[in-house]
Image (cartoon, rainbow, N blue to C red):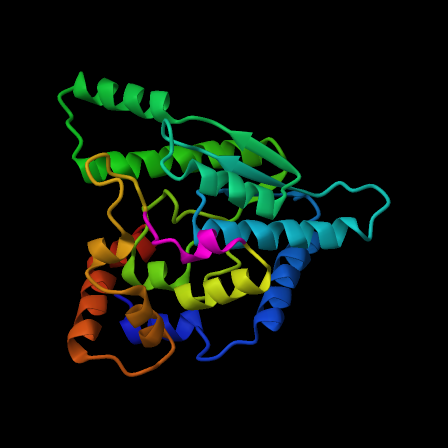
């Protein structure tokens, strides 16, 4: 089991950042990957209307624009995928995020029927999912769809997990935690907000309370309520700043509880 301090070193969250420098570095990271893997022409990303997917999506489209601007035939593209479960409570934010990203292509698929059909099929075999399991099912179905679309478009799937989510394990294994490339992994929540502000993102998208919204009986419960700790505290911890010992213990609790999500299969 990897020690939490080793993981912090690997995440490489900076104590202080230069926003424009960080933006350009991540755009070039995506651009260089595509140019070094000529069989890949598409960046595919799921857009939820939250801070992280909005930032990742915008970085993807800027990288695509940077490549295409040098080509006679603009063959690279970014596909933004909307995967609501019925009517999404923050639908307006999702539309605002798409408008801000301005992707080459947008695909929207309602996953509610797929999820319900799966749950009912399991129920017929006396397999009853908890609310948490249902939430994870939604996340995994979304990722299955995203990968299917990527496969048909010479694409790779772009991840949206930031350093806070990775250190706490606050993601679904083989769901939103799955991806081929991740441009924001070394950014904490606070830094993500700074980059979005620098990119002139509408404030509502990065000032809103982060909500996973996966569980039907708690659709408006914030990430911080579930974790029992503020993102600001986790930000400080990742940046090497001093936080109270009891808060450190909370972060360690989530880190070790969810460590299995970060491990490759044992062989």
Is 20 on the left-hand or right-hand side of 182?
A: right
Q: Position of residue 243 (x, y in %)?
A: 25, 79
Is 153 on the left-hand or right-hand side of 119?
A: right
Q: Position of residue 66 (x, y in %)?
A: 73, 55
**Residue that protrudes farthest toward the top in the picture:** 124
Query: Magenta segment: does it hold 208?
Result: yes
Check the image and report above or below for 204 versus 94: below
Q: Is residue 160 visible?
A: no
**Residue that protrudes farthest toward the bottom in the picture:** 242
Check the image and report above or below for 202 versus 78: below
Count of number-bearing discs: 0
Q: Residue at x 67, y 59 (%)?
A: 32
Q: Residue at x 24, y 47 (%)?
A: 221
Q: Is residue 12 visible?
A: yes
Q: Position of residue 112 (x, y in %)?
A: 35, 25
Check the image and report above or below for 186 versus 68: below
Q: Residue at x 19, y 60 (%)?
A: 228
**Of residues 121 and 206, the one drawn nearer to the viewer in this rendering:** 206
Res 153 → quadrant: top right
Q: Residue at x 56, y 39 (%)?
A: 80
Which quadrant of the figure contains the N terminus?
bottom left
Check the image and report above or below for 244 versus 212: below
Q: Position of residue 170 (x, y in %)?
A: 30, 54
Q: Which residues are magenta?
A: 202-211
**Of residues 209 and 171, the one drawn nearer to the viewer in this rendering:** 209
Query: Magenta segment: does it hold 49?
Result: no
């Amino acid at each position: 089991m990897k020690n939490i301090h080793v993981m912090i070193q690997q995440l490489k969250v900076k104590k202080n950042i230069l926003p424009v420098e960080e933006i350009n570095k991540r755009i070039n990271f995506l651009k260089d990957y595509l140019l070094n893997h000529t069989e890949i022409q598409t960046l595919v990303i799921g857009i939820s209307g939250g801070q992280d997917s909005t930032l990742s999506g915008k970085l993807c489209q800027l990288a695509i624009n940077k490549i295409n601007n040098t080509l006679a035939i603009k063959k690279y593209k970014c596909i933004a995928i909307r995967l609501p479960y019925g009517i999404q409570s923050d639908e307006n934010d999702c539309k605002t995020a798409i408008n801000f990203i301005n992707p080459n292509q947008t695909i929207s698929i309602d996953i509610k029927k797929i999820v319900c059909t799966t749950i009912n099929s399991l129920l017929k075999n006396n397999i009853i999912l908890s609310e948490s399991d249902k939430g994870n099912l939604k996340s995994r179905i979304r990722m299955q769809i995203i990968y299917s679309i990527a496969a048909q478009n010479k694409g790779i799937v772009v991840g949206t997990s930031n350093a806070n989510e990775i250190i706490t394990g606050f993601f679904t294994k083989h769901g939103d935690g799955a991806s081929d490339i991740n441009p924001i992994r070394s950014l904490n929540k606070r830094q993500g907000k700074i980059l979005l502000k620098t990119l002139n993102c509408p404030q509502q998208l990065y000032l809103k309370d982060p909500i996973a919204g996966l569980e039907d009986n708690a659709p408006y419960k914030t990430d911080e309520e579930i974790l029992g700790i503020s993102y600001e505290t986790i930000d400080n911890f990742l940046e090497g700043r001093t936080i109270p010992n009891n808060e450190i213990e909370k972060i360690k609790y989530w880190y070790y509880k969810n460590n299995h999500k970060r491990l490759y299969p044992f062989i």
